[in-house]
Amino acid sequence: MASSFLFTSESVSEGHPDKMADQISDAVLDAMLAQDPASRVACETMVNTGLAVIAGEVTSNSEVDLAQTVRNTIKDIGYNSSEMGFDYSSCAVMVTLDKQSVDIAQGVNEGEGLDRDQGAGDQGLMFGYACNETDVLMPFPITYSHRLVKRQAEVRKSGALTWLRPDAKSQVSVRYEDGKPVSVDTVVLSTQHSEDVDHATLSEAVIEEIIKPVLPADMLTSDTRFLVNPTGRFVIGGPHGDCGLTGRKIIVDTYGGSAHHGGGAFSGKDPSKVDRSAAYAMRYVAKNVVAAGLAEQCEAQVAYAIGGAEPVSLM
């Protein structure tokens, strides 16, 4: 790899349609686990104009008001008016959840199947990664992409910029020299907004109230570019602008492209699904290696066969 290069990662806000779907799937999961910790949940969500659909496979003794759980999640995100293109109180909610396959269950349940211990809910490969570029032992580009959309949500919910709306995306391009981040080259921040703000006002406010308070001053140069709403307008957003699906932001949810990915999503899956639990475990391994000062960066991989209690490989 060249001694000097640019690397880019992106993130999305809680109001992005795909991330809305992730949060709804996790809200259903959390509600079921709260009542029945042994719940087996694989919940997928689709959100579109005026509609939220949850589907998947569930085995649980919980009694959850699923439609209300969906609406509460959308309300917390901030879609509370038809003027935003989506309203938690009036949207349609469809529920189609089946029971987990008995063939899968016998491989996962302890004391059943060929392996008597609790087994993996599916086959697959999972990665964990850590590095010393930030205080959270994550790569710089994805860390600050996340912090930008988090700041956007904070400013929006505080009422500091009343024209902000929930849907937003960030992207940070960082210059590396000899493998170390040395400066921010380009920041892209696209945020949904109301009709009553012009682009110049919006751009200045986003730079001063969202971007500059987040990015380290010593990483900004006179050549750093700030691109705010590059199309010039972002009024139509959220599920009204794009259909959202659970599991479409797997790189945002992990390392922003800085490490490998096994392909499995996290949201809506209980811990028996190794797509989630094994990826978390590998992050724990990698993070502790770096935190202990044993390496500047670490990547770990594990793989499972469905129903197997032990990994088929570990690297």
Image: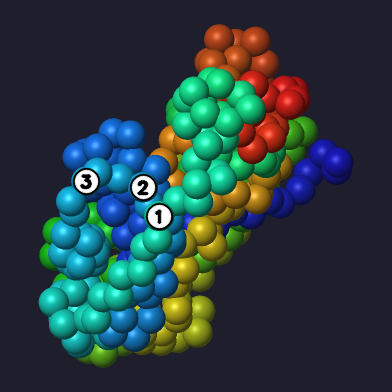
Q: How many marks?
A: 3
Decide: few, some or many residues near mark 2? Use Cα within 10 Å; few <14, some 14-19, many ≥20.
some
Q: Which residue is mark 2?
A: 59
Say if 11 sits above or below 206 in the image: above
Left/right placement of residue 154 relative to residue 286 reads left
Q: Dot 3: what SS?
A: loop
Q: Which residue is mark 1?
A: 99
Picture quarter containing residue 74? bottom left
Quote the CA–CA distance across marks 2 and 1: 5 Å
Say if 37 sits above or below 10 in the image: above
Which quarter of the figure is the N terminus placed in?
A: top right
Is residue 76 something that shows in the picture? no
Q: Position of residue 222 (x, y in %)?
A: 55, 56
Say if 235 sits above or below 180 in the image: below
Q: Residue at x 16, y 82 (%)?
A: 90
Query: In front: 5, or 194?
Result: 194
Instruction: Kindly indicate whether the residue at mark 1 contacts the one at mark 2 (C-beta within 8 angstroms).
Output: yes
What's the residue type where badge 2 is placed?
Thr
Quote the CA–CA distance across marks 3 and 1: 13 Å
Determine which of the numbered discs, if any, sits on residue 62 in the image: 3
Decide: few, some or many residues near mark 1? Use Cα within 10 Å; few <14, some 14-19, many ≥20.
some
Q: Position of residue 179 (x, y in %)?
A: 73, 34
Q: Dot 2: what SS?
A: strand
